[in-house]
Image: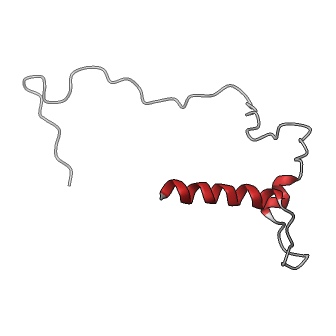
Amino acid sequence: MRAVVSTLLALHLVLAAFVPHVHVESAGSEPCAVCVSRAPAVAGSGTPDVAPEAVLAGEAQLVPGLAPVTGAPLGAIPGQSPPSASR
């Protein structure tokens, strides 16, 4: 049954595409899909620029970081008090 329905639908679509048809819409509406598919598409002259090139203004500058930490942390040396907890 599915094969019969699909065959009839395909036949209907093929016949609808080749048989002349009447437009019942007003002239200002969108064009008919069959008429659009029949019209040859005009190729464009060039490829659209969808991703323009990135222009670099100059070389990237890194932000200077903190000075390097040297020595032992407070409280690691015997006799040195640990850091106080701030509130």
How many numbered circles does the render carry? Answer: 0
26 on left or right of 78: right
Q: Does 55 appear above or below 22? A: above
Q: Nearer the viewer, residue 49 or 1?
A: 1
Q: Is residue 38 left or right of residue 64?
A: right
Rendered location of residue 1, percent (x, y)? 47, 59
Q: Picture coordinates of residue 40 (x, y %)?
A: 89, 48
Kindly give the residue lying farthest to the top in the view shown: 71
Q: Residue at x 64, y 28 (%)?
A: 60
Q: Is residue 61 left or right of residue 53?
A: left
Q: How is the image coloured?
A: secondary structure
Q: Quadrant of residue 36?
A: bottom right
Looking at the image, residue 19 sits to the left or right of residue 69; the answer is right
Residue at screen point 76% across, 33% down: 53
Q: Nearer the viewer, residue 50 or 56?
A: 50
Give coordinates of residue 47: x percent, y percent: 83, 37
Tell me the residue at 86%/72% (across/down): 22
Quadrant for the C terminus in the image? bottom left
Residue lying at the far left in this picture: please name it: 78
- Residue 24 placed where, x, y %? 84, 78
Residue at 13% x, 25% y is 76
Give above or below for 45 relative to 70: below
